[in-house]
């Protein structure tokens, strides 16, 4: 990989690290406010709503200037949202602003891969970016879990700097300040993201034109025989993954008797599995072989059902690692295939914006359904059962659709099968 690729990865890692640490701190802030339990999944709703509402604009914005500049502007918006939480603005509102920055950041961070690298390296590159994103989730929830522990923050608050009054007096303030430093570190790397030399399209001022263009791109990707399969898989994966974050916290508290800080660490266990699966997929799966991993999605949903019968930590950890590994192994090749088809059909930024629209709409729907079930006081074991059956059922339907497409015409044979 060229050196610029590692700069892109570093910028992405620290920005995602801060996002995930801030989520745990925001959950703790809601609990300190004694907010209703169903507000917690609403954090994810507020974060992702910008991906859906602004999908027609962020893709065009990402393609209108060098991707490194887009990443820097978007990361600055995240810093502003983090600052609002420091000023004790309601966590739902502050995290929504962070989501606004993330919505603009995403088409740039993924789109630059298709501009900067040859198509044969896209699976490897996605293995890197998913592995590092999952690494950011692991460290992010660990950092967030540590920062909400008073004994840790009390030690940090006790540190005195000569002639400097930091103005940090509470656990929440020191936690948010440290997370803001992570965003600033990501911004530093944004300055050194390479310019790919790709021609940029001037940003259109007419919203109606942007909506029309986005709608055209959306239909184009769903009509493409390979695009529709990869888009359906990744859409389901991100909706299920976001919901699983909250399910694991609730399940760990109910089945294993863990508190929020400990449950957040258990989320990291799932992320270890995803990173492992992503690395293995990057090593062994070429673009042409990407569609062969679809049955693993069916298996993942079935294995989730086993969580209903687990009440010991020594069984929970390997099971969560296995669920994560299956997820990482099938989503990385699907992401690469989707980026490949999108880049050919409509350009990198527009393609990622369409992908984000569908994936985050899925997150809104699935976390919304989780919110309804929790508000109705449904048992977490029923939630797990419905979740696992839903994932397996949808993945089975996607597989049947792909087989029907292949019987009509073999599109897979045209994909690149060169070694990494």
Image (spheres, grey):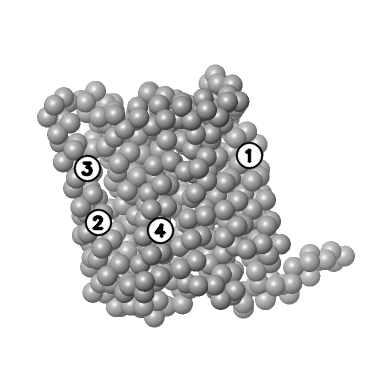
Q: Kindly identify which numbered label has been placed on residue 398.
A: 3
Label 4: how many Cα within 10 Å (few below 14, some 14–19, many 20+):
some
Q: In which quarter of the image is the C terminus?
A: top left
Q: Which of these two is toward me, 416 or 310?
A: 310
Q: Kindly identify which numbered label has been placed on residue 390.
A: 2
Indicate the position of residue 244 as horizontal and vertical percent values. Answer: 37, 61
Nearer the observer: mark 1 or 3; the answer is: 3
Distance CA(mark 3)–CA(mark 2): 12 Å
Q: Kindly identify which numbered label has been placed on residue 368.
A: 4
Q: Are marks 1 and 2 in contact (CB under 8 Å)?
A: no
Give the SS element for disc 3: helix
Nearer the observer: mark 1 or 4; the answer is: 4
Q: Kindly identify which numbered label has been placed on residue 72.
A: 1
Label 1: how many Cα within 10 Å (few below 14, some 14–19, many 20+):
many
Distance CA(mark 1)–CA(mark 4): 31 Å
Distance CA(mark 3)–CA(mark 4): 23 Å
Give the SS element for disc 2: helix
Where, by quadrant of the figure, is residue 143 drawn? bottom right
Residue 306: in sight, yes or no? yes
């Amino acid at each position: 990989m060229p050196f610029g690729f590692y700069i892109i990865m570093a910028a992405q890692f620290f920005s995602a690290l801060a996002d995930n640490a801030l989520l745990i701190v925001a959950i703790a802030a809601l609990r300190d406010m004694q907010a209703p339990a169903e507000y917690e999944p609403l954090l994810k709703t507020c974060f992702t709503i910008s991906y859906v509402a602004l999908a027609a604009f962020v893709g065009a914005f990402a393609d209108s200037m060098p991707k490194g500049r887009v990443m820097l502007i978007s990361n600055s918006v995240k810093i502003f949202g983090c600052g609002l939480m420091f000023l004790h603005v309601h966590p739902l509102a502050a995290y929504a602003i962070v989501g606004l920055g993330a919505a603009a950041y995403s088409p740039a961070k993924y789109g630059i891969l298709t501009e900067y690298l040859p198509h044969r390296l896209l699976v490897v590159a996605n293995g890197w970016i998913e592995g590092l994103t999952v690494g950011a989730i692991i460290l992010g929830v660990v950092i967030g879990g540590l920062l909400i522990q008073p004994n840790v923050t009390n030690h940090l608050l006790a540190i005195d700097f000569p002639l400097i009054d930091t103005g940090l007096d509470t656990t929440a303030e020191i936690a948010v300040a440290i997370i803001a430093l992570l965003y600033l570190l990501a911004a530093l790397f944004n300055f050194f993201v390479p310019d790919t030399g790709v021609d940029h399209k001037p940003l259109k001022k007419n919203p109606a034109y942007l909506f029309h263009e986005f709608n055209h791109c959306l239909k184009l990707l769903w009509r493409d025989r390979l695009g529709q399969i990869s888009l359906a898989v990744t859409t389901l994966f991100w909706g299920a993954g976001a919901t699983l974050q909250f399910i694991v916290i609730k399940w760990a508290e109910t089945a294993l008797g863990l508190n929020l800080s400990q449950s957040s660490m258990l989320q990291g266990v799932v992320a270890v599995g995803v990173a492992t699966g992503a690395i293995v997929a990057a090593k062994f799966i070429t673009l042409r072989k990407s569609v062969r991993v679809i049955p693993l999605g069916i298996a993942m949903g079935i294995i989730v059902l086993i969580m209903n019968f687990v009440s010991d930590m020594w069984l929970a950890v390997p099971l969560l690692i296995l669920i994560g590994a299956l997820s990482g192994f099938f989503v990385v090749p699907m992401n690469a295939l989707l980026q490949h088809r999108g880049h050919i059909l409509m350009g990198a930024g527009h393609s990622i914006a369409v992908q984000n629209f569908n994936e985050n709409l899925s997150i809104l729907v699935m976390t919304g359904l989780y919110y309804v079930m929790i508000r109705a006081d449904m048992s977490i074991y029923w939630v797990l059962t419905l979740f696992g059956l839903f994932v397996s059922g949808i993945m089975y339907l996607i597989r049947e659709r792909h087989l029907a497409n292949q019987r009509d015409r073999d599109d897979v044979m045209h994909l690149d099968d060169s070694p990494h």
